[in-house]
Image (cartoon, helix red, strand yellow):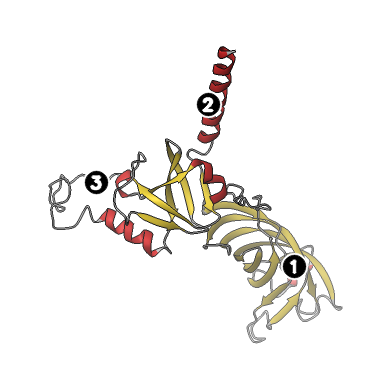
Amino acid sequence: MKPIFTFVTLVLAFTTFGQDTTHLGKSFVMSQNYKARECNAVGEPIPGDTNSCILLMGFLLRVEAITGSNYVIHIAEFSHSKELNEKFVRKTALYPTGEENKHGKNANSSNLPEPTEHELKVYFLIPINQFNFLTDPQIPVQSRHTFTAGIPTIPAKLRFGNGGTGNDPRYFRFEGNISLGLSAGWKYSFGKGSTKYAMNLLTGFTVASVPVDSITTRGKVNSSTTCASFSPHFGLVFDVDKVQFGLYTGLDFLYGEPNKYWVYRNQPWLGIGIGYSLFQVGGQSANTKNTKPD
């Protein structure tokens, strides 16, 4: 009976350890406020009544190590926390300019050692048994700089004129049409808390239906009609949560003979687009939140 009890105990111990280590090196978002004790990089508590800090909901943290029954965590983003900024200033004050630092060397000395990553980080302890209640692992933490792709729609275009002068007289036109295509490019995400923002720099193409008439073809087309066009474009799109507002510019190349006579040939247009999740690629949102039981 005793060997069986010992075996079960070992299995449970290894299982618990395996569960604890699954969070190592991963990032999470604080789902509620928590007063945490400050420690060093190996989890040793820093003595003193003031060495604690309120970790606010929305903070991005990273699990750096395990010590005893606690995780050693580092707050990756805290620019809006006065308390954490003061702690960071205290860390960087170990390397004052024009004075002897903790290494006994002048900061202007050429052989002054650079501060290590661990020396400049601020670490805290979070109990392992409370970690899932204090963080939301279902929120994916992605890089601020990502690749993005999607299907743009540009319902309105502005074409600029030359006052009706010259060999190709053009007038300002506002056109409403439907254009669909593909776009891809670079996305930069930012924002704190529940509201997320992003900026997208995009390039791609659309296929559109462009209205033409006698005026825009110098009399070569007698009636008002539409022509298919191929339109390469560049775009700057801003995201506020899942709503997007975009500005685009590009060129329209009409299909067939009308392109020879079209007065807006090789003339850039300005497009406006408003959409919902036009360029969101993947990702998941947390549809459940951990709540601490009474």
Query: 57 above or below 23?
Result: below
x and y, in percent, of residue 276 in the image: 70, 64
Q: Name the front one of labels 1 and 2.
A: 2
Q: Amino acid at mark 2?
A: Ala
Q: What kind of element bears circle 1?
A: helix
Q: Is residue 248 left or right of residue 64?
A: right
x and y, in percent, of residue 180 in the image: 75, 61
Q: What kind of element bears circle 2?
A: helix
Q: Earlier in the sequence, mark 3 or mark 1?
A: 3
Q: Nearer the viewer, residue 75 or 262?
A: 75
Say few, some or many: other residues with alpha carbon within 10 Å of mark 2 (under 14 / 14 to 19 / 20 or more). Answer: few
**Circle 1 is placed at which residue position?**
259
- The circle on residue 114 is 3
Report whether residue 57 is seen: yes
Residue at point 62%, 64% (across, down): 241
Q: Do the residues bearing badges 1 and 2 touch, measured as CB atoms within 8 Å?
A: no
Q: Earlier in the sequence, mark 3 or mark 2?
A: 2
**Circle 2 is placed at which residue position?**
13
Residue at point 37%, 59% (across, down): 84
x and y, in percent, of residue 129 in the image: 53, 41
